[in-house]
Image: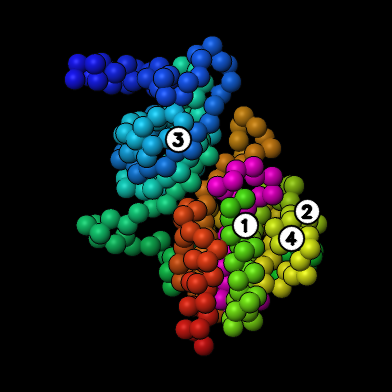
């Protein structure tokens, strides 16, 4: 017991030292390592930009436990982080400096059944809210508005083509393209549409998005963008849409080519009203296609 107690004291002082035996990495390494972390938020310290997380086992680094982590390059996250939220993040560890922090955060807010339902802000997205008639430009360079989807069940998510993270935009785009393929083979193929909106208008031109989308649909595929479309707008247009749906994003101060962001996916009924807002990435293409099928067959 005494040894375990001492180990916990050492761990609270220096995460890196406590995990040295687990990581099997020498302290002399100056390379910053990254590890995937998933867990439940216990508390949030906005003033000091820290979050306490009850996390699962971090493969190759440390066992499951509860501890506080600094958060960097994700100030937007403190607008959404709350007790009982489920988060996925990258734990960055600099062994040489004895430093560690979380970044690349994805948040899924877990509803606490013991608390009364909060009153939704009438100006922003929530179930039953009608989506404003935002305008964008699709992958073929054609302007369109959200009202053009009336009569269709629509899923909307947000991505940017340069995103390197497999659990973020890569997963969102893979899920959307796979869901589109499922829809194409279903009875609701004429009633369902999917839309991925880029929040990187400086880089994601319509031509770039078309190339990006084609990569997910497959080079040998005869599929077009009739079910799944990608779109972008001016910075002002995209910001208004992202704000409405509760998406937060900001340029990484350490690497201007990268954008730190949350994850949001919305399901909209044929009347243009929101059915559900899905936070995080804990869902599959099959899950999404199933939800869209239910809405498309229910609403006439």
User: Does residue 109 lie above or below 228 as drawn?
Assistant: above
Label 3, label 2: how far apart the Cα atoms are: 36 Å
Query: Dot 4 lies on which element?
Result: loop
Number of the front mark, 3 or 1: 3
Please check the rendered image and state whether residue 153 is part of the magenta-colored stretch, yes or no: yes
**Residue 209 shows in this picture:** no
Using a 10 Å C-alpha cutoff, classify the residue at mark 2 as few (fewer than 14 neighbours), some (14 to 19) or many (20 or more). Answer: some
- Give the quarter of the image for residue 270: bottom right
Q: Which residue is mark 3?
A: 59
Q: Nearer the viewer, residue 146 or 223?
A: 223
- Circle 2/circle 1 CB separation < 8 Å: no
Q: Is residue 34 left or right of residue 21?
A: right
Please check the rendered image and state whether residue 143 is part of the magenta-colored stretch, yes or no: no
Nearest to N terminus: mark 2 or mark 4: 2
Q: Which residue is mark 1?
A: 174
- Circle 1/circle 4 CB separation < 8 Å: no
Determine the residue positioned at 60% across, 79% down. 186
Q: In this picture, which residue range is highlighted in magenta?
A: 147-169
Using a 10 Å C-alpha cutoff, classify the residue at mark 4 as few (fewer than 14 neighbours), some (14 to 19) or many (20 or more). Answer: few
Nearest to N terminus: mark 2 or mark 1: 1
Number of the front mark, 2 or 1: 1
Nearest to N terminus: mark 3 or mark 2: 3
- Give the quarter of the image for residue 191: bottom right
Query: Dot 3 lies on which element?
Result: loop
Q: Which residue is mark 4?
A: 218
- Residue projecting furthest to the bottom: 300
Q: Nearer the viewer, residue 136 or 190?
A: 190
Q: Which residue is mark 2?
A: 208
Expressed as whole percent of the image width and height from the top left, the position of residue 34 reads 53, 31
Expressed as whole percent of the image width and height from the top left, the position of residue 169 reads 60, 50
């Amino acid at each position: 017991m005494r040894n375990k107690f001492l180990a916990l004291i050492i761990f609270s002082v220096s995460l890196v030292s406590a995990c040295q035996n687990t990581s099997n990495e020498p302290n002399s390494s100056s390379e910053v390592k990254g590890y995937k972390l998933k867990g439940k938020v216990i508390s949030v310290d906005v003033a000091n930009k820290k979050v306490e997380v009850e996390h699962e086992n971090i493969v190759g680094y440390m066992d499951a436990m509860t501890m506080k982590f600094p958060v960097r390059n994700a100030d937007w996250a403190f607008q959404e982080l709350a007790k009982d939220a489920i988060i996925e993040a990258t734990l960055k560890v600099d062994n040489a400096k004895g430093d560690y922090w979380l970044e690349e955060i994805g948040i899924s807010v877990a509803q606490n059944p013991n608390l009364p339902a909060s009153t939704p802000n009438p100006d922003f997205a929530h179930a039953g809210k009608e989506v404003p008639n935002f305008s964008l430009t699709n992958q073929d360079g054609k302007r369109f508005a959200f009202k053009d989807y009336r009569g269709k069940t629509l899923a909307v998510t947000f991505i940017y083509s340069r995103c390197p993270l497999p659990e973020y935009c890569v997963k969102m785009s893979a899920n959307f393209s796979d869901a589109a393929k499922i829809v194409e083979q279903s009875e609701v193929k004429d009633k369902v549409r999917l839309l991925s909106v880029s929040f990187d208008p400086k880089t994601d031109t319509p031509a770039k998005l078309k190339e990006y989308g084609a990569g997910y649909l497959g080079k040998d595929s005869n599929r077009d963008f009739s079910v799944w479309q990608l779109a972008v707008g001016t910075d002002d247009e995209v910001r208004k849409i992202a704000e409405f749906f509760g998406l937060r994003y900001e340029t990484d101060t350490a690497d201007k080519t990268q954008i730190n962001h949350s994850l949001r996916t919305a399901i909209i009924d044929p009347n243009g009203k929101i059915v559900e807002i899905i936070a995080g990435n804990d869902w599959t293409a099959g899950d999404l296609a199933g939800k869209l099928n239910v809405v498309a067959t229910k609403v006439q």
